[in-house]
Amino acid sequence: MTDHEVLSGGVNQVIRTGATVRRPTGPWSPLVHRLLRQLRERGFTAAPDVRGVTADGFEILDFLPGEVSDYPATPAAASREALETAAELLRAYHDAATGPLTAVTEGWMMAAREPAEVICHGDYGPHNCVLDGNRTTGIIDFDAAHPGPRLWDIAHAVYRWVPLSTESPRPPAEQAVLARVFCDRYGLDAAGRAGLVDAVVARLHALVDFMRTRAAAGNAAFAGHLADGHHLLYLGDAEYLERERAVFERHLAGGG
């Protein structure tokens, strides 16, 4: 009997068949496939390999076994070990996502940003990572990939994994400690830490702008996110980070 399963997802319906998954493609998919093949060539195996594209426009990718969290995060995805290993995995991904592809500025779903140091994943969080127990072992859904600075991707990742949010049960100081842990495990330099709060705030505003643009273009999923008020959370979290900036910057710089 064929192992056939519809997997949950925020925007796209993903269908698993045995050891592969099928996902809808978009105009950006050829670039994403080049990225995934480059990762394999460079020995990075924590992302799915590309098997091909069907005649009706679905990409066929390797299925990465493990658990994927939705929101609120599962206990495993909310663990410190998941955050630490997510930071280490993001660093390994970034190190494999450099090179000539970063010079391709057109054709991605999200706009390229300067300096184009790496191909950012674009949406690196528990909902797009695979866990084995409490360890983050895989990355999925590269539709939002685009050239940009490492810090642009790190900012979104820290926001999602800590999370840096008014909806978190942790007070600002505890969130700040986890943000520093993520930066430590990634190996982010002092300049990156100093710019992290600004980068997260800018990333949240850019996310809301992207959602509005996609919804205005007729994307039902993003229109639904706006109707549900997701953008209000992101804008509120940006204001929260501005209010608590001193707490976060003190911890990120090494203070208590």
Image (cartoon, helix red, strand yellow):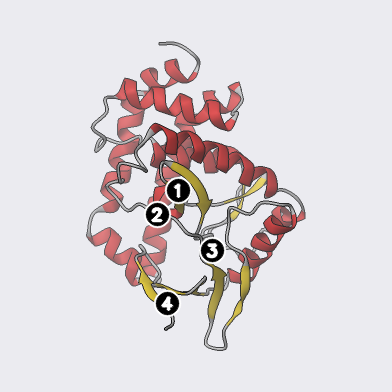
- Left/right placement of residue 141 relative to residue 159 reads right
Tell which circle, 4 or 2, labels the residue nearer the N-terminal end: 4
Task: Give yes or no for contact between labels 1 and 2 (Cβ–Cβ under 8 Å).
Answer: yes
Between label 4 and label 2, give the one nearer the viewer. Answer: 4
The residue labelled by disc 2 is 67
Indicate the amino acid at tag 1: Asp
Residue bearing mark 3:
109
Q: Amino acid at mark 2?
A: Glu
The answer to whether 78 is drawn above or below residue 123 in the figure is above
Q: Judging from the image, what secondary structure is the residue with disc 2 in?
A: loop
Q: Is residue 115 visible?
A: no
Residue at 23% across, 32% down: 169
Of marks 2 and 3, which one's residue comes earlier in the chain? 2
Compared with 195, 97 (above or below) is below
Helix, strand or loop at label 3? It is loop
Tell me which label, 1 or 3, sits earlier in the chain: 3
The quarter of the image holding the N terminus is bottom left
* Above/below status of 171 relative to 26: above
- Quarter of the image where the C terminus is located: top left
Q: Is residue 237 visible?
A: yes
Q: Which residue is mark 1?
A: 132
Q: Earlier in the sequence, mark 4 or mark 3?
A: 4
Question: Which quadrant of the figure has residue 213?
Answer: bottom left
Instruction: Give the CA distance from mark 4 to mark 1.
Output: 21 Å
Query: Which label was assigned to residue 203?
Result: none
